Structures are given as structure tokens and as C-alpha cells.
Amino acid sequence: MTGFRSLLAASLTALGLLLSPTLGLAQQYDPGDEPGLIADDSYALPSQWRRQMVFFRTNEPPGTIIVQTAERYLYLVQGNGRALRYGIGVGREGFQWQGLLRISRKAEWPDWVPPAEMIERQPYLPRFMAGGPGNPLGARALYLGATIYRIHGTNRPDTIGTAVSSGCFRLVNADVTDLYDRVPVGTKVVVRQRPEL
């Protein structure tokens, strides 16, 4: 029995080293792009990231989506100097981009198929995950042109206001559902690194 206890203790020690945040496999773990367990209703979104109507100056027409990566906000232009502002999570360092696209497709509770580039960086990710509450794309997805990028929900509301994704823009599920219902396929999306002067 003493030999079994020694073997069990050694096994638990080895497992602890592997799961340690400073050693082993945990160093390869990226919390930005994986299934999570936090529901919107169990997380209190800080007030600065909550959806609200704001004053917003732009030359873009009403209905345009403007993403301000540096600010961590997505704006839906309303006209008359106003926009509906949503707090978002953005791409981490090296995965931020800017450009002009249009929404090419919309999906409710989308399936998740990580692109090959993401699998190469994070081989532990699943190759497919059916849509649902545990899916990293959350409740809705708005696909951006022919790119791999999306505006989507999340099962990790704690990442709103941070830069942890592989280039997509994430909103809490209630917000992405609200945005999804407001914009059609073909909507213009302007992605900026810095605010317009």
C-alpha cells in the first residue's frame, strides 16, 4: 500500500507541474480562442463596456459599423451626430488590422471551425464545435467579406475590453444579438486602429 501511495503522490506532483501557470503545457494555453464556461448572466460587464447611445462625429452614413480597435468600441452610426456604442474584445498584439469590408453573411448560434492558421498556432483547439452556449462564437456571427474575421458573440464576457482574439471582434451575447437584429447583410464595416481626427 505504501508503494501505491508513493506512486499516486508522484503522479499528482507531475500533473501539478504540467498544469502550473509557469511550467509545462500551460505555457502554450491561450485563453483568447477556446471554449469557455462563463455565461453572460453570471458576469457583470463593467459600465464602460455596456451598450449605450453616444455622441459620435463621422462622415459615414447611418447604418455603418465603425470599429475603433484602440478604444475597444464598435459604433453603429445612427445619424444626427449619434451612434450606438458597444464594448468589444479585439485582436491581440500582432493580430490587429484595419480596412473596409461589408457583412457577407449572418448566422445564429454559428458552428465554429477554427481556421488552419489558428490550429497551427494552437493545436489543442477542436477542429469543429457545434453552435451553442459553450461555443466561442457565442449567439451570433456577422462574417466580414471573404476574410476569416467576424463580429461575433462570446462565451467569455470577461474578455470584453481586452485584446486577446486572433483578429475577430467579440461582444457579449446580448449585444451581438442586438447588433445582428439591426444590420443587414451588405452593411459597410470600417475597421480603424486609431480614431478619426
Image: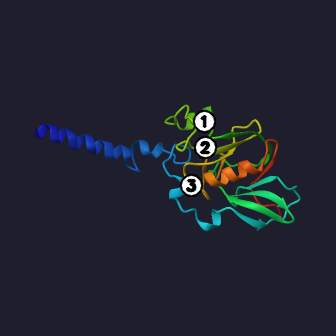
Nearer to the camera, 98 or 175: 175
Place of residue 145 in the rendered image (x, y in percent of width and height, measured from the top left): 77, 39
- Would you name the residue on which mark 2 appears? 137
Nearer to the camera, 33 or 135: 135
- The image's mark for residue 111 is 1
Sequence order check: which comes first, mark 3 or mark 2? 2
Q: Amino acid at mark 3?
A: Pro
The answer to whether marks 1 and 2 mark residues whose Cβ atoms lie closer than 8 Å is yes
Sequence order check: which comes first, mark 1 or mark 2? 1
Q: State the SS at label 1.
A: loop
Place of residue 53 in the rendered image (x, y in percent of width and height, measured from the top left): 74, 65
197 vs 132, left or right, is right
Residue drawn at x 72%, y 48% as measured from the top left = 180
- The image's mark for residue 27 is none
Q: Amino acid at mark 1?
A: Asp
- Would you name the residue on which mark 3 appears? 157
Q: CA distance from mark 1 to mark 2?
A: 8 Å
Place of residue 116 in the rendered image (x, y in percent of width and height, measured from the top left): 61, 32
**Displayed quadrant of residue 58:** bottom right
Sequence order check: which comes first, mark 1 or mark 3? 1
Nearer to the camera, 32 or 35: 35
Q: CA distance from mark 3 to mark 2?
A: 11 Å
Q: Amino acid at mark 2?
A: Leu
Quadrant including the N terminus: top left
Residue drawn at x 85%, y 56% as measured from the top left = 62
The answer to whether marks 3 and 2 mark residues whose Cβ atoms lie closer than 8 Å is no
Instruction: Please determine whether, in this image, residue 14 is positioned above or below residue 57.
Output: above
Residue drawn at x 48%, y 43% as measured from the top left = 28
